[in-house]
Amino acid sequence: MTQIQRYVNRITSYKRRRAGVPRTQRSSPRASIPVARVDLYHQFANHFKGLRISQSAMPTPEYSVELQQGEPPPEILEYARQHCGEDPNTRLQAICELRELIYERGECTPHRMDDEFLIRFLRARNFIPQRAHRLMANYYQFKEDYPELFDVYPMDLHAIGDANVITVPPYKDQDGRRLLLWRVGCWDPKTISVEELFKATVLSLELGVLEPQNQILGGVALFDLEDLSTQHAWQVTPSVASKIVKLLVSCFPANTHAIHVINHSWIFDKIYNIFRPFLNSVMRSRIFFHGYDVTSLHKHIHPDHLPKRYGGIWPDYSYTIWLESLKKNKEVAKEMIKCGYKFRDYEVSPEVLRQLKDEGIKLF
């Protein structure tokens, strides 16, 4: 019996008591009052149906595997003004100052010098040209030190997506920030090397920074350490820890708004001691440890914006959904090629391949 039927039964019984109908008659078959009962049932059914419709119309995270490369909405630009020092009245001046610093100091040779590219570094450093220039110099030094992380065919990273080690959900958190999830326990070091994990992480960051909204708000990282073993711990050397911190803190034009660590055991405590010397006080303040308590995580990320495994509403999505989207987006593929990434002819759609060739852009 449904909740609606029970509710109708109670009201019908109440009305018949008011009318003085004996209990034995009140318990007679429903056919004794067919019209009134059916009408009442439909009234409440329609009422509850309306409630269900209103609940389904409640705001839910937007699902999309398309990067949002357009102008951010006004509220995000206002956030940029208040928290990133991005004043529309002085934006162009800051871009020109950064461009002049690049020419004057000669510490790096950017592959692009247009406003859209330079503003990424300014947003990551509160629109202070000197700090943005230092970040840019660090970024290109990192590319020079680790060229193997950028000399990549993105479609070769399918194994990481298939293993669910790294994923970027096709929805954002309640504040509009992208989420980057690492499920370290899914990683088999025998089949996926540390270098491959870095390649996938760098690719995720490069894709994320193409979104102006992400440049402004920063991203949120979630490390799930369930099933973390000593086999994983042995892979995290001081050199690896230093490289991770460089990516998240000093060498990439993206802000890390917060890092959440969940399902961690004593093994992680040993690993974290390796990271600690590389973290400044600001970065430490952005790291939150939740143990095995998802309700603690929910204080920062609403369950409506999390996978079911963390008390949320969403299924798990593979990293590969983004790789597949690359095949169909000419502008994103072009950006990736400029960053040094490579594609084989069959790894992009025929239409994208034709457009890129028409523009004289080589895939590899």
Image (cartoon, rainbow, N blue to C red):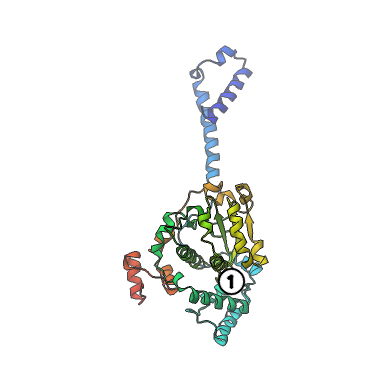
Task: Give above or below for 282 relative to 20.
Answer: below
- Observer able to see residue 303: yes
Query: In the picture provided, is 226 more to the left or to the right than 191?
Result: right
- Disc 1 marks a residue whose amino acid type is Ser
Can you say whether 242 is above or below 93 in the image?
A: above
- Considering every residue shown, the one lying at the far bottom of the view is 104
Q: Which residue is mark 1?
A: 250
Specify the quadrant of the image occupied by residue 283. bottom right
- Image quadrant where one finds the C terminus: bottom left
In the image, 133 versus 267, the foreground residue is 267
Q: Position of residue 173 (x, y in %)?
A: 57, 56
Query: Considering only vertical position in the picture, is 166 above or below 98?
Result: above
How many labels were placed on the picture?
Answer: 1
The picture places residue 285, in percent across and down from the top left corner, at 67, 62
Q: At 59% across and 55% down in the image, what residue appears?
A: 268
Q: Nearer the viewer, residue 219 or 12?
A: 219
Report helix, strand or loop for mark 1: helix
- In this view, the residue in front, 296 or 48, is 296
* Residue 286: quarter of image: bottom right
Q: Is residue 78 visible?
A: no
Q: Which residue is pictured at 50% across the width and 23% down the height? A: 35
**Looking at the rendering, which quadrant does residue 3 occupy?**
top right
Expressed as whole percent of the image width and height from the top left, the position of residue 233 reads 54, 58
Task: Specify few, some or many for label 1: CA neighbours under 10 Å numbering under 14, 14-19, or 20 or more.
Answer: some
Picture residue at 49% right of the left edge, 77% below the top? 144
**Rendered location of residue 114, percent (x, y):** 50, 79
